Amino acid sequence: MHLPVLLQETVDALAVVPGGSYIDGTLGGAGHAAEILRRAGPAGRLLGIDRDVTALERSAARLAVLSGEKVLVHGAHGELRCLAEANGFAAVDGVLLDLGVSSDQLDTPGRGFSFRFDGSLDMRMDTTRGESAADLLARLDVQSLADVFRRLGEEPRARRIAQAVARAQRQAPIVTTGRLAEVVTEAVGGRSGPRHPATRVFQALRMAVNRELEDLERALEEGLRLLRPGGRMAVITFESITDRLVKQRFAAHAGRWVSLQQGGERWEGELPAVVRVTRRPLEAGPEELAANPRARSAKLRVVQRCEAPVRD
Ligand SMILES: C[S@@+](CC[C@H](N)C(=O)[O-])C[C@H]1O[C@@H](n2cnc3c(N)ncnc32)[C@H](O)[C@@H]1O
C-alpha cells in the first residue's frame, strides 16, 4: 500500500478551493488526489494521469466514493497539455507532480524496480509499451551505459560499473534484478555504507527506461501554462537530479529584477511568471519519517502563477 508523502503540506500548499479544477500528473494510489477532491468538494474537478494501468484501476476504485468530477487517463505527463486540453482541463487551479515510483510498483518483484527482490529486469511504468531495462542494458555500449549511470544516477564509479555490466552481458544477458545487483556489487568491491551499491544504477536505469527527465521538463513547462493566474504547481521529487531541475525551472519563471542604468528596474525571466510559494523545499518531519521511510528524500517545491512578474 502506497502512503502519500507530505500529504497535508502538499494539499495545503496547493491552496485547493471548493469548485476548483486540478490535475494530478502522477496519480499513483490517488492519496493526494483523494485529498484534493475532498477539499474541492462536489463541484471540484480532477484530471488524474498515470502511465501505469494498474495504478489507474486501483485509483478509480478509491476515488469512486468521492464527489466531484474525476477523469482518469492513461498517459505520460510529458503530454500534459495535450491530455489536459483533450479532457476539458485547459485552464486549472492546480497541478501536482509526485514523481518517481510508488511503493506498489517498488514492492512488486515482477516490475523489476527494486534490488530487494529478484525479479524480471523490466522497470517500465507503462508495461503496455517501450523498452525494458534488460533490453536497454543489452542495447547500450559501455560509453552510453556509463553516461546513463553518471548523468541520471550521479554514480561516481559509472565507467567501472558499465565495463563490468558489458563483460557480464557477454557471458549471459542480464535479465533479472538479482543478477544486475550482483554484477554492480562485485564491480565496486562489495558493500560498504548503509546504501546498497546498486542504488544509483537502479535509479539511473529507471529514469532512462521511463524517460523521466524529458517528461518532467515538458510537464513543468506545460503545467505552468495550464494554470490560471493565481493557480499553483506543486512538485515532489526524490532525487537530487530531479529536484535540481524543478528548482532551476521554477527560478527561471520567477525571474529576477535587474537595475537599469537610467534608473528603475526590469524583470528578466521566462513566461508565464510565477512567485515561489516555497523558497526552500519542504521536507518530511520526524513523525512522517517514522511512519514512512520513503519520505526520507522527498522535497516539495511550489509556485504560484501570476498575471505579471512580481517580486517573490
Ligand atoms: C510516487 S507515485 C504517486 C503517488 C500518489 N501521489 C499517491 O498519493 O498515491 C508516482 C506515480 O506516478 C506515475 N508516473 C511516474 N512518471 C510518470 C509520467 N511521466 N507520466 C505519468 N505517470 C507517471 C507512476 O507510475 C506512479 O504511479
Image (spheres, rainbow, N blue to C red):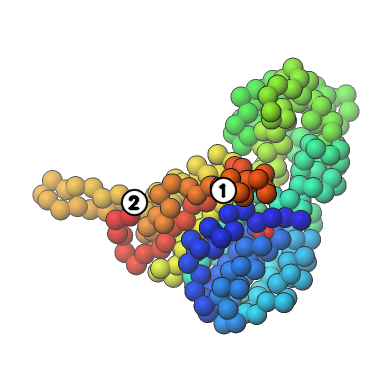
Name the N-terminal-most of marks 1 and 2. Answer: 2
**Toward the viewer: 281 or 69?**
281
Question: Where in the figure is residue 119, as x and y percent of width and height?
Answer: 86, 41
46, 295: nearer the viewer: 295
Task: Decide if residue 162 is in sight here.
Answer: no
Quick check: which quadrant has ligand 1? Answer: bottom right
Name the residue beneath numbered marker 2: 255
* Image-based side of 211 in relation to 125, left or right: left
Query: Which image quarter is the C terminus in?
Result: bottom left
Q: Is residue 284 left or right of residue 194?
A: left
- Residue 164 image offset from top left, x and y in percent: 76, 22
Q: Which residue is drawn at 58% across and 45% down?
A: 286
Q: How many numbered marks have been drawn onto this rendered protein structure?
A: 2
Q: Where is residue 155 in the image (x, y as percent from the top left)?
A: 63, 28
Whether ligand 1 has any atom under 8 Å from the Cβ at mark 1 is answered as no
* Distance (Cα) linking label 1 and label 2: 28 Å
- Residue 230 appears in view: yes
Q: Residue at x 44, y 70 (%)?
A: 228
Residue 217: % across, % down: 53, 51
Above/below status of 266 relative to 162 = below
- Seen at 76% across and 56% down, the residue is 1
Say which mark, if any, is on residue 284: 1
In the image, residue 133 sits, relative to residue 160, either above or below, namely: below
**How many other residues sit within 10 Å of disc 2, few (<14), some (14-19) or many (≥20)?**
many
Q: What element carries label 2?
A: loop
Amino acid at the residue labelled 1: Ala
Q: What element carries label 1?
A: loop
Disc 2 marks a residue whose amino acid type is Gly
Q: Do the residues labelled 1 and 2 touch (CB within 8 Å)?
A: no
